[in-house]
Image (cartoon, rainbow, N blue to C red):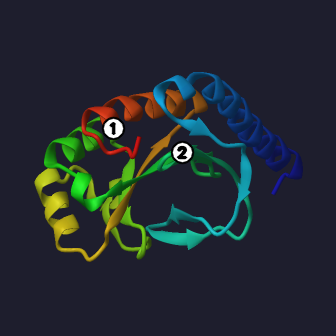
Amino acid sequence: MDAREIHKFLNRMWESIFTLNEELKLELPKEGFRVEDVEEAFGAYIFLDGEWRLMKYPHPAFEIKPQMEVGATPESYYFVVAVPRERISENFLGLFLEIFPRSFIYGSEDFLNDFYNWRRDGRVSPTEVLERIKKSNEKVFQFEANFGSVKALKRGVLRLIDIGKRFEIFNL
């Protein structure tokens, strides 16, 4: 383990999220969203070696109100959007999976039990994922997408806002 490399990696990760946060604070209010400050997020999970593992260390994240979190873990940059069950349509779900192929869908209550997992499921039909969702007792579902860069994350957030408004998933 090279402490210098870890130090540089963590600094890049945090700095990129601080920069994105400032950019989105300027851009998103006109879209009806409020961008909160970056915080140290604790108690998150990361999907490694085929399973969800608790991160006992903090990672940078911030909220975009309503309903979104944006951040970075050692594995990827990400956003998560909370979508109430009644606002999930097959068309929204299909477009989400098409636009964000590196994604996870899981419940708000039982978040370790995912309904879609890009690392495990591959290309499953939106109909099949919707059936899994309908069989669940969850009321709110977390739609997470992973990205390889902060630039791709920003494009993803803006694209999510576009499709989210189109399918009326947001409480605006």
Identified at 40% across, 33% down, the residue is: 161
Instruction: Name which residue type carries label 2.
Output: Lys
Q: Give the image location of residue 150, x and y in percent.
A: 59, 32
Quarter of the image with the N terminus in it: bottom right
> Distance from label 1 to label 2 (Cα)?
13 Å
Residue farthest toward the right in the current orientation of the protein: 4
Looking at the image, tell me whether mark 1 or mark 2 is earlier in sequence order.
2
Please tell me whether residue 65 is drawn above or below residue 15 in the rendered image. Answer: below
Tag 1 residue: 164
Badge 1 element: helix
Identified at 71% across, 41% down, the residue is: 13
Residue 96: which quarter of the image?
A: top left
Whether residue 28 is visible here, answered yes or no, is: no
Q: Give the image location of residue 63, x and y in percent.
A: 60, 47
Quarter of the image with the C terminus in it: top left
Whether residue 13 is visible here, answered yes or no, is: yes
Which callout, 1 or 2, points to the residue nearer the camera? 2
Closer-to-camera residue (51/127): 127
Q: Give the image location of residue 165, x and y in percent.
A: 32, 34
Q: Give the image location of residue 162, x and y in percent.
A: 35, 29
Whether residue 80 sits left or right of residue 159 in the image: it is right
Badge 2 element: strand
Tag 2 residue: 65
Residue 59, numbered circle: none
Identified at 17% across, 67% down, the residue is: 134
Closer-to-camera residue (35/1): 35
